[in-house]
Image: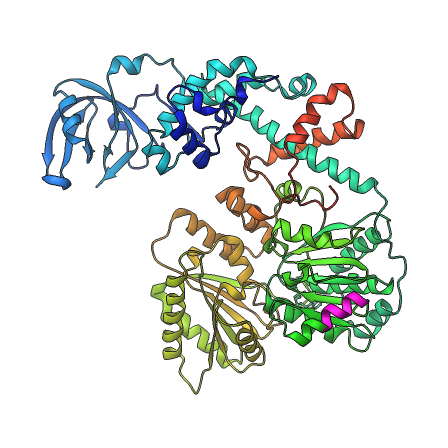
């Protein structure tokens, strides 16, 4: 049955063709239903009136509303720079209100001696409260609002605002659409769930999200809509998971053979940590179960994930299967290739490499070797997923530092086989538990929560540009002990030119302060050719230079145990997870290592918190949790591309962790009783799951 919700937005009064096109392009709104699901992101209380005297510089609210009398007004300046300054007072104090635009009109409207209601963002100038461009209302109009009612604020864009579709314009459309669609809004959750969870009905929730009648009504509406969203996601994820676990289609690796045994008894360079052993056991259990392994291995930088991957690949080889290992960068792929080749020397395994920079001979050798089955282990970058790459019998895929790969890229690797290979995804970006539950709900999670013995915790300091001399002095002392140091500059997409300038300036000043022949400085950055980068890295590793100046390209995968100091310049411009990754580049040998965060003097509160957290703790999980709290999940490294194939409209993976856990439990209980949701009572849940099932190719599950 057609519903008003499906009606084209262009027929709504006040829209029309042109604005309809804008709404679609700028906000994805095509139908009345889209408009109703375009939720506000904030609500403001327009019934509260503040006393001017109570609005001090520590005022916590984003908006303020006052009722005050016009005491005087004057134009300041002339021509385009002219502004209107109006002094108002409410008996408790006075404030200056300023307009830069429409000044003539405002000046005429505001009569001296009369009272108005002013609403806007508070501003403080030399400690004095004022407002710029406040909204003006007559007190009678303002008094007409129901007490406790809140006003919705919608996100908008410049183009929409120019077409009179700022937050007020959008609110007007929603108000016009509501009476038309109200009757078409059916319930989407079964009565049982609504009752058990104490939720409000969908229609009530949608009404109150746009027109909250009270703060508590708004809260109930938000909760209901978040619940629905997260519940739908969990139904999808848990259904996939149970399907994967009931299908018997995984390759079985029953043998522990010569490759593994010889490596274990003769090649293993050090005893494994307890955590490494535990994870190897988990992988072993997966690969004999008959089900396909789909495991996420989380381990902090330096925790020894590569070795675990190697052991898994040896098990595959012992059972006649090929493996491949995909790394996010050329440098890292080469490094893995070198260390895997070294550690498997003499075992009779064939290891090959394939990257975008592979020369013809290397490429041919790899492609032919894997197609014929002669190559046992293939290591490379995303060149591995090119169509030309054909495996004879791929049994295991290892993906290192997975957050760098897009969902589609992963899906392509997995479809190289008729039967899905086992998959081990490794990441050093710790993902908080609830986020992992949602992004990787279909993956088993292993954690290496122990560093190899003998590592001393890295000491971290926060310094400002003013401390530079002291920082350089510290570097000189470390270098005098025979150690090496990194100095890293930010490289942020979109402002690359400026960033390279930072790097070049930094390089110049460092070579001036650390001159030859006493000091050798090497620079590495993203614009260099892969070969040159490798050469520079190798020279640094061999100790030919004491200082490496770099952009954040070294973030992933440099392993130089003799490097003991990481200096991060403009540290306030890095996110927490990136800072932590960079810090993990030192502290890889037995010596005490240091991380020095250098920032400007003036910092935002958030930047200050980030840097303080870095100084405080070395625990990547703790930092990841904090990161999520500070920023919400939206900006978390890699979340955009790591699996969530749709936008959350109202829930936030960072802030709504409790609801995530709750919905996972509720969804799990229902699916336990009715795995296919075939029960007529669950018909609404099937539709809900369907709504939250990502469409290929964005689908990140390999079995859908
Ligand atoms: P990551 O988990 O960051 O990928 P790597 O696998 O690169 O860590 O290991 C970091 C360093 O620790 C490497 O030099 C590796 O050889 C070393 N290492 C790994 N496991 C152990 C262990 N059990 N004992 C001592 N050193 C280890
Ligand atoms: Mg690694």
Q: Give residue 317's position: percent from left, percent from top.
A: 83, 65
Is residue 217 visible in the rendered image? The answer is no
In the image, the segment drawn in magenta is: 365-372
Say which quarter of the image contains residue 97.
top left
Q: Look at the image and tell me in which quarter the N terminus lies.
A: top right
Q: Main secondary structure of the magenta part?
A: helix
The image quadrant in which ligand 2 is located: bottom right
Task: State the residue in front, 30 or 319.
Answer: 30
Q: Give residue 304's position: percent from left, percent from top.
A: 69, 63
Is residue 525 visible in the rendered image? The answer is yes
Q: Residue at x 64, y 63 (%)?
A: 383
Q: Residue at x 34, y 54 (%)?
A: 602
Q: Is residue 92 above or below residue 513?
A: above
Q: Is residue 1 above or below residue 425?
A: above
Task: State the residue in front, 56 or 140.
Answer: 140
Q: Give residue 55's position: percent from left, percent from top.
A: 28, 30
Q: Give residue 580's position: percent from left, percent from top.
A: 54, 58
Q: Residue at x 77, y 66 (%)?
A: 370
Task: State the residue in front, 462 or 269.
Answer: 269
């Amino acid at each position: 049955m057609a519903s008003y919700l499906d009606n084209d937005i262009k027929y709504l009064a006040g829209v029309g063709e042109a604005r309809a096109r804008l709404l679609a392009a700028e906000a994805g709104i095509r139908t009345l239903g889209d408009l109703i699901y375009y939720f506000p992101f904030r609500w403001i209380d327009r019934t509260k009136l503040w006393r001017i005297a109570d609005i001090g510089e520590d005022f916590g609210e984003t908006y303020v509303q006052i009722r005050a009398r016009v005491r005087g007004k004057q134009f300041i300046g002339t021509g385009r720079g002219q502004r209107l300054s109006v002094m108002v007072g409410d008996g408790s104090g006075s404030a200056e209100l300023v307009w830069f635009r429409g000044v003539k009109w405002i000046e005429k409207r505001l009569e001296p001696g009369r009272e108005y209601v002013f609403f806007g963002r508070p501003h403080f100038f030399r400690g004095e409260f004022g407002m710029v461009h406040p909204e003006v209302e007559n007190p009678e109009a303002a008094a007409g609002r129901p007490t406790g009612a809140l006003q919705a604020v919608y996100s908008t864009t410049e183009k929409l605002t120019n077409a009179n579709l700022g937050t007020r314009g959008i609110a007007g459309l929603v108000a016009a659409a509501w009476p038309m669609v109200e009757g078409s809004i059916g319930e989407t959750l079964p009565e049982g769930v609504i009752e058990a969870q104490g939720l409000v009905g969908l229609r009530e929730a949608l009404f109150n999200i746009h027109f909250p009648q009270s703060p508590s009504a708004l809260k109930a509406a938000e909760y209901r809509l978040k619940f629905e969203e997260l519940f739908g996601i969990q139904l999808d994820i848990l259904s996939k998971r149970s399907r994967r676990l009931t299908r018997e289609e995984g390759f079985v690796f029953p043998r522990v053979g010569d490759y593994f045994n010889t490596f274990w008894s003769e090649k293993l360079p050090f005893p494994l940590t307890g955590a490494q052993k535990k994870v190897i056991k988990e992988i072993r259990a997966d690969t004999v179960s008959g089900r396909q392994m789909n495991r996420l291995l989380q381990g902090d930088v330096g925790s020894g994930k590569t070795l675990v991957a190697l052991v898994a690949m040896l098990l595959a080889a012992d059972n006649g299967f090929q493996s491949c290992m995909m790394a996010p960068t050329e440098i890292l792929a080469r490094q893995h290739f070198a260390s895997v080749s070294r550690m498997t020397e003499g075992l009779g395994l064939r290891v090959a490499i394939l990257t975008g920079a592979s020369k013809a001979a290397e490429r041919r050798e790899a492609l032919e070797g894997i197609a014929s089955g002669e190559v046992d282990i293939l290591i490379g970058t995303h060149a591995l997923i090119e169509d030309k790459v054909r495996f004879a019998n791929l049994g295991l895929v290892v993906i290192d530092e997975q957050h760098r790969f897009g969902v589609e890229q992963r899906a392509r690797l997995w479809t190289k086989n008729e039967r899905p290979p086992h998959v081990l995804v490794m990441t050093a970006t710790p993902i908080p538990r609830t986020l992992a539950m949602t992004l990787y709900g279909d993956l088993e999670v292993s954690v290496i929560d122990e560093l190899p013995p003998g590592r001393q915790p890295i000491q971290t300091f926060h310094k400002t540009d003013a401390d530079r001399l002291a920082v350089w002095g510290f570097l000189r002392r470390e270098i005098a002990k025979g150690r090496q140091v990194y100095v890293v500059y930010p490289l942020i997409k979109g402002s690359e030119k400026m960033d390279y300038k930072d790097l070049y300036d930094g390089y110049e000043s460092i070579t001036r302060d650390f001159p030859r022949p006493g000091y050798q400085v090497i620079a590495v950055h993203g614009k260099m050719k892969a070969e040159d980068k490798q050469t520079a890295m190798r020279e640094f590793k061999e100790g030919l230079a004491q200082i490496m100046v770099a952009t954040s390209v070294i973030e992933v995968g440099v392993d130089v145990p003799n490097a003991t100091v990481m200096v991060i310049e403009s540290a306030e411009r890095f996110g927490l997870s990136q800072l932590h990754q960079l810090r993990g580049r030192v502290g890889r040998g037995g010596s005490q290592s240091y991380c020095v965060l250098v920032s400007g003097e003036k910092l935002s509160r958030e930047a200050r918190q980030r840097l303080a957290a870095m100084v405080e703790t070395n625990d990547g999980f703790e930092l990841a949790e904090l990161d999520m709290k500070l920023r919400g999940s939206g900006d978390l490294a890699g979340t955009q591309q790591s699996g969530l194939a749709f936008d959350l409209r109202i829930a936030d993976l960072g802030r709504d962790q409790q609801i995530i856990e709750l919905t996972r439990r509720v969804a799990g209980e229902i699916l336990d009783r009715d795995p296919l949701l075939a029960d007529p009572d669950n018909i609404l849940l099937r539709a809900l799951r369907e709504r939250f099932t990502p469409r290929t190719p964005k689908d990140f599950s390999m079995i859908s």
